[in-house]
Image: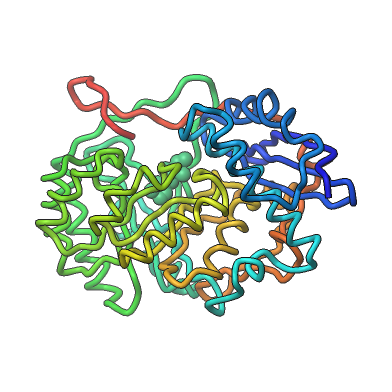
Amino acid sequence: MRIVDAEVVVTSPGRNYVLLKLTTSDGHTGWGDATLNGRELAVAAYLSEHVLPLLDGRDASRITDTWGFLYRGAYWRRGPVTMTAISAVDQALWDIKGKAAGLPVYELLGGRCRDGVTVYGHASGAGIEETVAGVQDFLDRGYRAVRAQSRIPGLVATYGIGTGVSEVYEPAVGAVPMEEIWETGPYLDFVPRMMARIRAELGYGFDVLHDAHHRLTPIQAATLGRSLEPYRLFWLEDPTPAEDQSAFRVIRSHTITPLAVGEVFNSVWDCQQLIGERLIDYVRTSVTHAGGITHVRRIFDFADLHGVQTGAHGAGDLSPVGIAANLHVDMAIPNFGIQEYMGHVEPTARVFDVGYHYSEGMLHVSDRPGLGVDVNEDAARAYPYVPRQLPVVRLRDGSMHNW
Ligand code: EZ4
Ligand code: CO
């Protein structure tokens, strides 16, 4: 089973997605997600200029060997662009292996450990009342875990807030990013009041999550974590910029609020200390950005050895192919915690034939062979790439901060 064709597909049905399609000599096709939000074309070029020429004629059944060939063979290791590109090849090869075997990928990973993948939804609002209503709306739709984000009074824009109730935020179209102003004081005052209202009005019979999106210092994060303890969060996500791993010793020594980190990580080396020292409770690496199923499985096994559970990134900037790849891993690992699920904007369904479905707080993978997501290439061509930028953040005095 040789790779005889490889193609990069860039499409923008509401958001930009980069996909890799591999075809084998015996007629199987495999799809991989190569989407890196805001830096899409770098991965597309890495693949088409540096990876695709190496794949021609390779044995498609040798997934781990191909992973090592691309990782070690580049000499320049790690980094989001490299690891997203390797991931796309890895996903496509797992998709092919499943199709060749006539089995869904989770069967090849050891079979199902659970009935479905518990997901959390994204509630947001222009203030506390709207956010409480947004959480209630998710509970009404069967979710048992909801992330709550609200606009902060006094701040013009806040991370995670769409234009209407629980509408997901979308990156701005154009070559120049939007600039937002951030103030930590009002945020630290607001979030505990929001969580108090959520618990007072909706009770403790569901899980609530929150994403601080890298905005705090370690001691501010410790302060927030401690003030949220009465509301028993499922997790506080990304309280500080995640590359500073020892910062989490400070946070951890002050609060019992569970911590989740890692959507921006692309290898096990990014979270070696966080997991090895048990400084976090959930690791958020995704198949798409952390080297594919082959590498994410190793991260999640390493986490399991240290009592850390998984909570893979699943925002709308991951294509349905990448989400499906995460779901197959989620089904097959013992230390699954939760899966992020934002869904996709409407035109996405015209490009992707998505095998998984949502029901009663869970996503269910399909039993189609492989990853179970197909791509309509004619439809994909109808949505050409649109430059989009994630926002950037400054403090009141004009200095740069973290979005
Ligand atoms: O900001 O995926 O927890 N989810 C998140 C996401 C990220 C985007 C960045 O591309 O933090 O909303
Ligand atoms: Co996040």
Residue 70 % position (x, y)? 60, 36
Q: Is residue 64 left or right of residue 130?
A: right
Residue 304 % position (x, y)? 38, 66
Q: Is residue 369 left or right of residue 68?
A: right
Q: What residue is shown at x 22% (from left), y 27% (from top)?
A: 395
Image-quadrant location for residue 328: bottom right
Q: What residue is shown at x 40% (from left), y 69% (from top)?
A: 145
Residue 375 % position (x, y)? 76, 48
- Res. 338 in view: yes
- Vertical side of 397 occupied by 355: above or below: below
Q: How many marks?
A: 0
From the viewer's side, name the closer residue of 148 and 291: 291
From the viewer's side, name the closer residue of 124 and 29: 29
Residue 396 % position (x, y)? 19, 26
Q: What residue is shown at x 58% (from left), y 55% (from top)?
A: 323
Image-quadrant location for residue 400: top left
Q: Quadrant of the C terminus?
A: top left
- Res. 161 in view: no
